[in-house]
Image: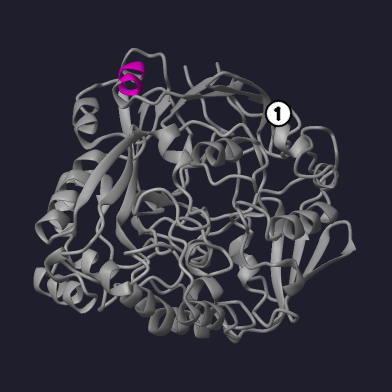
Amino acid sequence: MDRRRFLRNSAMAGAALGAPIINPDFFFSSARAQESRPLVFLSAENITGNWDPTAHTTLSQTNIEGFVMGFLTRAPMRPENPDEVVYELATEINELDAHRLEIKLREGVTFHDGKPFTAEDVKATFEYGAQLDRPKQVYPGPTDTFEVTTPDDYTVIVDTSKGGYGASLFIFLASYLPMLSATDIADGPNGVLSQRLNGTGPFRFVEQRGNDTVMEAFDGYFRGAPTVSGVTFSFVGDATTRMLSLMNGQADVIERLEPEQVETLEQEDDIKISRLVSVENKYLWFRCSKPPFDDWRVRKAACHAIDRELIMEILGSAGEASSNYISPIKFGYIDLENYPEYDPEECQRLLAEAGYPGGEGLPELEYITSTGFYPKTKEYGEVITALMQEQGFPVTLNVMEVAAWNERLYDRPGGGPGHMVDCGWSTGSPEPDLVLRTHFHSTSKRICGIEDPEIDAALDAERDAPSLDARRESLQTNLMPLLADKTPALSLFTSVLIHGMRADVEGLFIYPDGMSDASETTVS
């Protein structure tokens, strides 16, 4: 995807230094409708209980953060307008040179606890979010590769000269990392950050009641008090229960609809459907940290055993075909020519080369997946299992409830549970390395646990490229093809987010990472 227009005013794209590189501030109406009742949103995923936004990778809590927290910019990342970026807490971002970025901040914004939002909060958030001990480590990090200074209360300068990479990486980061209070950060990761959310967004975190997260309208929101009195965000693990709750009026919005549920709900006059290509890809992650998937030939053989076209037939409207490790609406995406396709002969050749002719000698392999959150994981998991068994892989599918699957998700010293894990990865930014570096660099192992010097070098090379054009070329001609050759995971498809909502819900904007803007939403 060509994102040159996004950078048409940037210094690195050849324009004059100091020109703003993001589109003008989005217009928000100051008119507010009469306040309506709270919005009830049913989630398909449980929460962790730790509210520090850098301490988890849980989508349900990320979605809650979308109601409560503020961001420097927001990136809708719509296919029809992929370059649109909306100023929120920032009012402009300028490239002073290749390694220095100037961020101007909105004045008159306060956190929900009353603290004014200033440059010290941006500095503290960037530095805290980049620490290597953060479970949701924010790229580009670590902290010794950049410096943040604050010339005044509403100006932030990011200098990446120590790290050798372009400061433009923070442009993408600005649409991903929620701004935290410097006071909260000073309290430490086990302090107030873990106990509650404190943001600048339209809704204030009130409390957690079992599976219900309760938020209320924040009258001090800088764009004006929301029109709904609050949001109740509730975990309901069963997809049928979520659908019935929407149909009988107990819920206003539900997520992660199954394709057949869409067909049912489309027949209901008082319900409408929202579809959008997401920033989330679904992956089959290999445990590269232990045999047999510590051998790239076995991983690639497994990829050639899988017919992704069959998976797309099962998914229907819930999936979008793609051939890369990132979503098509992220920076640098291309369809990779060497992306592994269904090829039983090549599968057998690679197995034999790795010392497992016809699969002989392979250990029993556990394939872990979940049910109730992602659409059709059990159904296409059964297809993947059968296809791999046909090629000699002794695979057993283990379908787990979301909470149990979550506990077994990440790699561990000596190798994580199972041998293959089904999991998506979604980040609300155009930045590709929030997926690629997060999972495939040896310093930031997540699910697959790979350690490969060639992949590390390719990741470092694209990060350190002197311009975004050079970075795009490095991604497309070096890193991405290398990943397709070494296959630490197989990206199966790009998710399509499907929400069902009551027809009387108006003004709810859903981002392609699942976050929602309900600041001007009404429900009757």
Q: Pointer 1: residues within 10 angstroms few (<14), some, or many (20+)?
A: many
Q: Looking at the image, what colour scheme do you see?
A: one colour
Of all residues, the one furthest to the right in this rendering is 152
Instruction: Please check the rendered image and state whether residue 371 is part of the magenta-colored stretch, yes or no.
Output: no
Residue 388 position, x and y percent, is 16, 57
The quarter of the picture where residue 31 lies is: top right
Q: Is residue 175 left or right of residue 337?
A: right
Q: Is residue 121 above or below residue 443?
A: above
Asked if residue 117 can be seen in this view, the reply is yes
Residue 323 position, x and y percent, is 28, 67
- State the residue position of label 1: 218
Q: Quadrant of the N terminus?
A: bottom left
Q: Is residue 82 above or below residue 239?
A: below
Residue 382 position, x and y percent, is 18, 44
Residue at left offset 44%, top offset 49%:
512
Residue 411 position, x and y percent, is 48, 54
Q: Main secondary structure of the magenta part?
A: helix
Between 287 and 493, the residue placed more toward the observer is 287
Q: Is residue 114 left or right of residue 8?
A: right
Residue at left offset 48%, top offset 35%:
508
Q: Is residue 478 left or right of residue 121?
A: left
The magenta region covers: 241-245
Asked if residue 376 can be seen in this view, the reply is no
Tell me the SS state at disc 1: loop
The quarter of the picture where residue 52 lies is: top right
